[in-house]
Image: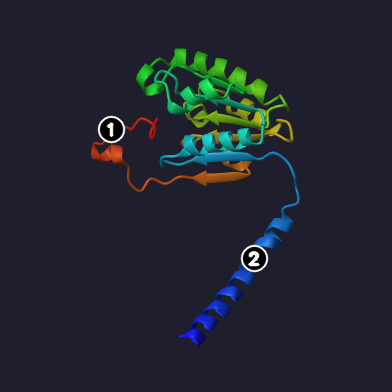
């Protein structure tokens, strides 16, 4: 039994040493230091949650953070309540119109989107922001509320040290081309589709 355990240990050690070499080589090859563009997309739950996880991570290091939420804003969310009360160092703006499929007011939504984008654009020109989150921005492109070229130009020409997270479904191939990291969240199943109400503190 001891000999068998020793054999397993040696095999495990060999595999882990090889894995460590591969990881160390990957880390060593990543020698460019700059801000990154991240796109969180797909039909699955968790895009905004992931973005706000990065907000908390940046705050842990004392970095300045800006957040602009498109679409959302009529119903208070847990992240809004927490950031407004506990994180005054975060510049936080919500479009405030709620979901565009609820408002059904294209001209009003476009005006609100343009106002919100003006705030986001200033953040993207301010190198003091370490991280900027543009939550649900993809909808503004999909619905053609904002000019895609203007948005992509601002994203590409932001300060070199600034990282940006864009969330939402769709948004087009140009956003994918712009981003350094793209994660697609796939929905396998969702409680809402089984008649379970959205849960405070979990879904909003």
Task: Classify the position of the C terminus by image quarter.
Answer: top left
Is residue 173 in view?
no
Query: Residue 197 has which mark?
Result: 1
Which one is in front, 93 or 142? 93
Query: Residue 20 has which mark?
Result: 2
Left or right: 73 as drawn, with respect to 66: left
SS of the residue under disc 2? helix
Left or right: 4 as drawn, with respect to 60: left
SS of the residue under disc 1? loop
What is the spatial separation of the Cα atoms under label 1 and label 2, in whole angstroms? Answer: 45 Å
Query: Residue 132 has which mark?
Result: none
Question: Residue 114 location, x and y as percent?
Answer: 56, 17
* In the depicted structure, whether residue 200 falls above or below residue 179: above
Residue at screen point 73% across, 57% down: 29
* Residue furthest left as drawn: 195
1 and 2 marks in contact (CB < 8 Å): no
Which one is in front, 198 or 165? 198
Label 1 or label 2, whichever comes before in sequence order: 2
Question: Residue 181 location, x and y as percent?
Answer: 60, 45
Is residue 30 in view?
yes
Question: Residue 68 location, x and y as percent?
Answer: 55, 24
- Occupied quadrant, residue 63: top right
Which one is in front, 67 or 116? 67
* Residue furthest front as drawn: 2
Task: Tell me if mark 1 has few (under 14), some (14-19) or many (20+) residues whose alpha carbon lies within 10 angstroms of its own.
Answer: few
Task: Tell me if mark 2 has few (under 14), some (14-19) or many (20+) residues whose alpha carbon lies within 10 angstroms of its own.
Answer: few
Question: Residue 185 location, x and y as percent?
Answer: 45, 45
């Amino acid at each position: 039994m001891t000999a068998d355990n020793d054999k397993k240990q040696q095999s495990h050690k060999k595999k882990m040493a090889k894995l460590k070499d591969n990881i160390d080589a990957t880390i060593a090859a990543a020698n460019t230091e700059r801000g990154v563009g991240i796109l969180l997309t797909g039909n699955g739950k968790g895009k905004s949650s992931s973005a706000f996880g990065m907000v908390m991570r940046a705050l842990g290091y004392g970095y300045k953070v800006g957040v602009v939420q498109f679409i959302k804003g009529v119903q208070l969310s847990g992240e809004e309540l927490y950031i407004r009360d506990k994180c005054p160092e975060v510049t936080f703006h919500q479009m405030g119109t709620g979901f565009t499929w609820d408002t059904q007011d294209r001209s009003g939504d476009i005006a609100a989107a343009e106002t919100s984008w003006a705030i986001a654009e200033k953040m993207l020109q301010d190198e003091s922001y370490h991280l900027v989150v543009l939550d649900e921005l993809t909808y503004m492109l999909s619905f053609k509320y904002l000019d895609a070229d203007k948005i992509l130009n601002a994203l590409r020409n932001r300060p070199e040290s600034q990282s940006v997270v864009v969330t939402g479904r769709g948004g087009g191939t140009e956003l994918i081309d712009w981003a350094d990291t793209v994660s697609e969240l796939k929905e396998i199943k969702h409680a809402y589709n089984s008649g379970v109400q959205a849960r405070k503190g979990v879904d909003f």
